[in-house]
Image (cartoon, rainbow, N blue to C red):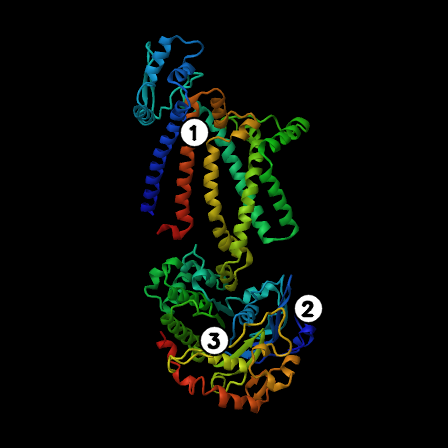
C-alpha cells in the first residue's frame, strides 16, 4: 500500500513538471512564434503609450530578453522558491509559489487566486454532494426498475440534463426562482465562516444548476454499471446464500458499480475546482473561472497562467486522491 | 410431457396440497418457460425426479438441455418476472414453486446451497473469502462475528485450505482456481444444508484439481449425509460421483436410471451418443470418437415428435412415429426409464450389437481415468 502511494506521488510530481513545461510553452513561446515581440509583452504591463526606456526596464525586470531556457528556469524557480522584484524604488518579495503579478492590477496573482478560490470551492463541492447523491440514487433506482416508468422518466430527465447547457438552465432558474417567484435572493457569495445559512442560500441555484448537469451523467453511468454488475456471477452467489435483495444490492452490487464512478468523479471535481467557468459566469459569481475569463479578455498573461497552473494542480491532486482511494476500494489494485 | 400447451399459469396445481412427499427432494413435472420476443423458450419442460439424503443425482446434457435452469428453479433463483414456472418442488416437506419469494429466500443457503461453475467470477472480488463465508453463516445463525469468523476458519480447514486462519482474510484473487472452488464449497456448506446443487463444479478447473474437488464433495456428502445434485456434461464426473443419472435433452428428461444401469445398459440413442463422444484412455488413440451429428435444438422451436429425431440414426425404424409423437418417459425395466419410440427389446439389441462394441466393454471398471486423465 505504501509503495503504491509512493509510486502515485512520484507520478504526480513528474506530471506537475510536464505541466509547467506545457503551460510555459503555450503561454510564452506560442505567442512569440506567432509574432508577438517582447516589446508587445512589456507594453501590456507598462500601460498606455510607454516610453522606450520604460519598456526596456520592464523587459529587464521580467527577463524577457533572456534565452527561453533561462526564462523557464526563472519561471520554475519563482514557483518553487519565490522571487524578488526590484522596481527601482523598493524590492518586492514574492513568496513561493510566486505566480507573478497581474499586468492589469499589478496585484500578486497568487493573492487573487486565494481570494477567488473559496467561491469556486463552495460551488464545486456543494454541487458535487448534490449530484453524487442524486445521480447515484437515481441510477440505482433506474437499473432496478429497468424499463419501467420511473426508469424511462429519470433517463429522459437525465438526457435533458446532459443536453441542456448551464447557461440555459441557469438563466431559466434565475428568471423564475429569483425574479418571478422571488423564492431566493440573487445568487451571491457569503463566506461560510461568516454566515452558513446565507452561504447556502446564495449558492443554492449554482449548486442545483451544476448538479443537474453532472447528476444526469452520473445517473446514466450508475445505471449502466448497476445493470452490468447485477448480471455478475457473484450476485447470483449472494442470492444463493439467501441474502435479502436489499443486502445483495447495497453490499455486493453497489461496490462494483461505484468504482468506475469514483474515477470519473475525481476528474470532474478536479476540473471544477480549477474554475466552473460557465456556472460562475451565468450566476455572476467571482470564482476562479471568472478570474481566468477576465484574464483572457484583458490579455493578462500572468493571471491566465496562474489559474491554469492552479487548475492543473487540482486535477492532479484529485486524481492522486482517487488513485489512493481506489486502492482502498478495490483490493485487486493493491498488488 | 407432451402436454406443454396445457401449461397452467398458477404455480400450485390443485392436487399439490393433497400430495405428501416421501423423499427429501421431490420434483414433479417441473416446467420453466421464458416468454421472449422470438417466442416461448421452454427451458425446462416436464422434469420429475426424487432424491433422498445421502444420495447423488447426476444430471447430464448438452448446453441448453435445461439442466442448469432446473437447478436454478429449485433454488428459486429464476427471475419471477420474466419466467413462467409450474409443477411442484418439495424440499424437506415444503413446496417451493408456490411459496413466496421471501419463504424461498429463507430456505436458500440454509436448506439448499449451490456451487457454481466458475469460482472466480462467483466470488465477490471486493470482499475477503472469510467475509463472504461469515456473511452466509450469520445470515442463518444468530452468532457474533467472532464465532462466525472461527466457524469460517473451521470450514476452510474442512475443505482443505492450508493455513486457514491466515487465508480466511485473503481476497479471492489471492486464491488459486482449485482453492477458490474449495472456498465456494466451504461457503455453500457453512450452514449445513441438506441439499447441495453443484452446477458443473469442475468445468473451469485444471484437470488435476477436478478429481480433488470431486473427492471433496463426495467426502463432505458422506460426512453431512446431504443430498447432492451434480450437473455436468462430463460422463466421467457422473461415473465418479453419481448414484442415479438423469439425462436431459431439449428441456426434457430422456433417460433415468442408476449409474450402473446407465453405463452398462443405456437405452436412449442420445445417451449412446454421449458415450461415443467420450475420449477414453483405454482405447487406442487412433480410433475416432463417435460424435452426435447435428446441433442442439432451439428451445423455441423444438423438432416435432421426439426432439432428438433429427439427430437420431434410428428414427427410420419407427415408421414416422419419431416425427409425429412425443415419446413419454416410461419404465423399461424397474428403476430404468427411457423416452424413446424404439421397442425396449430393439434398444437392448442395438446397444449390445452396434454401440457397446464401439464404445467400451467396461466403462465403470476404469473410473480412475479422470484422476489419471491428462
Which residue occupies 45% across, 16% down?
A: A104
Give x and y (percent) for residue B177: 39, 64
The residue marked by circle 2 belongs to what chain? Answer: B
| Residue B101: percent from left, percent from top | 60, 64
From this view, report whether residue A35 is shown above or below residue B15: above
Instruction: Read off the residue under disc 2.
Output: B9
* Left or right: where A211 falls relative to A102: right
Picture coordinates of residue B25 (x, y %)?
A: 55, 76
Image quarter for residue B45? bottom right
How many residues crowd around disc 1 within 10 Å: few (fewer than 14), some, or many (20 or more)? many
**Residue B167 appears left or right of B103:** left
Question: Looking at the image, is mark 1 or mark 3 nearer the viewer?
Answer: 1
Image: A253 above or below B25: above
Residue annotated with mark 1: A308
Instruction: Give the mark nearer the N terminus: 3 vs 2.
Output: 2
Query: Answer yes or no: do the residues labelled 3 and 2 have beta carbons within 8 Å?
Result: no
Q: CA distance from mark 1 to mark 3?
A: 68 Å
Amino acid at each position: 500500500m505504501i509503495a503504491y502511494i509512493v509510486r502515485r506521488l512520484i507520478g504526480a510530481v513528474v506530471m506537475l513538471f510536464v505541466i509547467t513545461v506545457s503551460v510555459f510553452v503555450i503561454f510564452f513561446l506560442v505567442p512569440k512564434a506567432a509574432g508577438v515581440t517582447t516589446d508587445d509583452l512589456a507594453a501590456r504591463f507598462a500601460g498606455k503609450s510607454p516610453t522606450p526606456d520604460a519598456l526596456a526596464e520592464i523587459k529587464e525586470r521580467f527577463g524577457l530578453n533572456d534565452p527561453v531556457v533561462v526564462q523557464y528556469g526563472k519561471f520554475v524557480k519563482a514557483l518553487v522558491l519565490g522571487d524578488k522584484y526590484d522596481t527601482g524604488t523598493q524590492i518586492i518579495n514574492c513568496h513561493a509559489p510566486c505566480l507573478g503579478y497581474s499586468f492589469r492590477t499589478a496585484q500578486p496573482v497568487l493573492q487573487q487566486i486565494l481570494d477567488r478560490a473559496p467561491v469556486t470551492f463552495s460551488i464545486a463541492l456543494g454541487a458535487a454532494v448534490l449530484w453524487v447523491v442524486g445521480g447515484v440514487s437515481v441510477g440505482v433506482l433506474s437499473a432496478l426498475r429497468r424499463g419501467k416508468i420511473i426508469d424511462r422518466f429519470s433517463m429522459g430527465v437525465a438526457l435533458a440534463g446532459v443536453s441542456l447547457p448551464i447557461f440555459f438552465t441557469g438563466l431559466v432558474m434565475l428568471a423564475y426562482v429569483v425574479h418571478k417567484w422571488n423564492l431566493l435572493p440573487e445568487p451571491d457569495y457569503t463566506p461560510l465562516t461568516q454566515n452558513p445559512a446565507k452561504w447556502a442560500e446564495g449558492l443554492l441555484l449554482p449548486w442545483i444548476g451544476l448538479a443537474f448537469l453532472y447528476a444526469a451523467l452520473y445517473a446514466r453511468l450508475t445505471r449502466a454499471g448497476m445493470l452490468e454488475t447485477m448480471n455478475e456471477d457473484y450476485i447470483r452467489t449472494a442470492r444463493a446464500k439467501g441474502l435479502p435483495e436489499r443486502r445483495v444490492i447495497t453490499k455486493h452490487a453497489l461496490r462494483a458499480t461505484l468504482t468506475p464512478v469514483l474515477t470519473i468523479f475525481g476528474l470532474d471535481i478536479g476540473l471544477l475546482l480549477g474554475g466552473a467557468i460557465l456556472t460562475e459566469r451565468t450566476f455572476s459569481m467571482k470564482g476562479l473561472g471568472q478570474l481566468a475569463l477576465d484574464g483572457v479578455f484583458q490579455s493578462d498573461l500572468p493571471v491566465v497562467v496562474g489559474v491554469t497552473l492552479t487548475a492543473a494542480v487540482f486535477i492532479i491532486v484529485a486524481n492522486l486522491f482517487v488513485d489512493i482511494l481506489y486502492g482502498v476500494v478495490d483490493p485487486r489494485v493493491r498488488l | 410431457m407432451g402436454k406443454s400447451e396445457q401449461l397452467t399459469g398458477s404455480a400450485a396445481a390443485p392436487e399439490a396440497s393433497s400430495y405428501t412427499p416421501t423423499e427429501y427432494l421431490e420434483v414433479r413435472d417441473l416446467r420453466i418457460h421464458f416468454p421472449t420476443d422470438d417466442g416461448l423458450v421452454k427451458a425446462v419442460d416436464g422434469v420429475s425426479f426424487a432424491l433422498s439424503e445421502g444420495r447423488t443425482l447426476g444430471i447430464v446434457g448438452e448446453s441448453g438441455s435445461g439442466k442448469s435452469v432446473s437447478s436454478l428453479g429449485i433454488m428459486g433463483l429464476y427471475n419471477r418476472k420474466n419466467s413462467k414456472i409450474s409443477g411442484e418442488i418439495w424440499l424437506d416437506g415444503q413446496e417451493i414453486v408456490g411459496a413466496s419469494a421471501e419463504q424461498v429466500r429463507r430456505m436458500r443457503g440454509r436448506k439448499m446451497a449451490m456451487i457454481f461453475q466458475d469460482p472466480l467470477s462467483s466470488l465477490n472480488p471486493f470482499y475477503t473469502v472469510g467475509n463472504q463465508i461469515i456473511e452466509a453463516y450469520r445470515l442463518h445463525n444468530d452468532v457474533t462475528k467472532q464465532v462466525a469468523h472461527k466457524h469460517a476458519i473451521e470450514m476452510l480447514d474442512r475443505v482443505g485450505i492450508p493455513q486457514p486462519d491466515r487465508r480466511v482474510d485473503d481476497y479471492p484473487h489471492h486464491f488459486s482456481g482449485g482453492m477458490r472452488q474449495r472456498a465456494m464449497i466451504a461457503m455453500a456448506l457453512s450452514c449445513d444444508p441438506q441439499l447441495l446443487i453443484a452446477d458443473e463444479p469442475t468445468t473451469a478447473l485444471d484437470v488435476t484439481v477436478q478429481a480433488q474437488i470431486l473427492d471433496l464433495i463426495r467426502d463432505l456428502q458422506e460426512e453431512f449425509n446431504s443430498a447432492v445434485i451434480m450437473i455436468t456434461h462430463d460422463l466421467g464426473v457422473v461415473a465418479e460421483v453419481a448414484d442415479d443419472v438423469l439425462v436431459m435433452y431439449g428441456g426434457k428428461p430422456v433417460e433415468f436410471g442408476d449409474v450402473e444401469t446407465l453405463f452398462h445398459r443405456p437405452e436412449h440413442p442420445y445417451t449412446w451418443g454421449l458415450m461415443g463422444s467420450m475420449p477414453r484412455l483405454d482405447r487406442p488413440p487412433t480410433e475416432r470418437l463417435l460424435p452426435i451429428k447435428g446441433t442442439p435444438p432451439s428451445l423455441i422451436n423444438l423438432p416435432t415428435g421426439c426432439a432428438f429425431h433429427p439427430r437420431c440414426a434410428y428414427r427410420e425404424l419407427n415408421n414416422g412415429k419419431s416425427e409425429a409423437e412425443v415419446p413419454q418417459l416410461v419404465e423399461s425395466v424397474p428403476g430404468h426409464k427411457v423416452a424413446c419410440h424404439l421397442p425396449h427389446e430393439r434398444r437392448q439389441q442395438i446397444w449390445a450389437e452396434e454401440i457397446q462394441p464401439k464404445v467400451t466393454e467396461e466403462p465403470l471398471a476404469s473410473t480412475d481415468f479422470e484422476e489419471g486423465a491428462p
